[in-house]
Image (cartoon, rainbow, N blue to C red):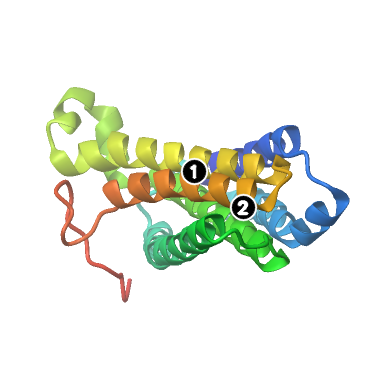
Amino acid sequence: AIGFMRAGNIGLVLLIIRKCTFHASFEQEKSDELHWSFLLVFCIALVIIRCLLRTVLRSFGQNLSLFFPFSTVAMNFYAILILIHSWNRWLVVLTLLYTTATAFYGWLGKKDYTKGDTMMRGITVGLNHLQIILGFVLYFQSPLIEYLRSDMQGGLRIPEVAFFGVMHISIMLIAALVLTVGGAKARRCISDNDKFRTVAVYFTIAIALILFALPSPVSPFVQRPWMWLDF
């Protein structure tokens, strides 16, 4: 429940940051309208689902704290979110690599910045924001984080707990901030070459941060499978 509430708040904060920092033309706003509408609906849905869960559980005369995060339903939901989070991370990486590659190609080749480039930039940032929201839901439902809260000093001595409790979330938030700022700056650029250069620089930094903090079988910090296939 806490994860739903805070993830919804994080999503709404991202919307506010976007409205305060993105000064785009009407055409640019229209082309990106679907992405931000989806993000807003997703955040509102998280809050509504949380309220519905609270109502249903209370109707059975049970305290919500007895069910989250250790009940069978909650843990199944937690496993489903891990599955979605795992698959979506590769969508983020693939779209980020593609958008960055086309940005370098357009920058060095003096190409025109097309509507397709604008669309891919919006999709890349949107998928990253979705990943951050999913990550926050998982963060506040994770047994590892619960342990870290109960014993901060002892938890930080365990590599897995320290990684997911501090390092992973911090670096991924920085990467999301870099992507958001890079997208905002690219929107304000006048020339096509400046747009490509801005996207190339900021998105390259984001790629480096994401790959550094991405759990995988070859990670020096925490090993996880390339892809979760079941739950």
Q: Answer left or right for 186 relative to 81.
A: right
Residue at label 2? 46
Q: Answer left or right for 216 relative to 168.
A: left
**Res. 153 visible in picture:** yes
Numbered mark located on residue 202 in the image: 1
| Front one among 81 and 220 | 220
Residue at 72% over, 65% down: 115
Dot 1 amino acid type: Tyr
Q: Answer left or right for 1 relative to 13.
A: left
Whether label 2 touches label 1, CB < 8 Å: no
Residue furthest top as drawn: 153
Looking at the picture, how far across and down is residue 129, in whole percent? 55, 50
Of label 2 and label 1, which has the lower sequence position? 2
Looking at the picture, how far across and down is residue 111, in whole percent? 62, 62
Dot 2 amino acid type: Leu
Quarter-wise, where is residue 24 in the image?
top right
Q: Can you say whether 80 is above or below 188 in the image?
A: below
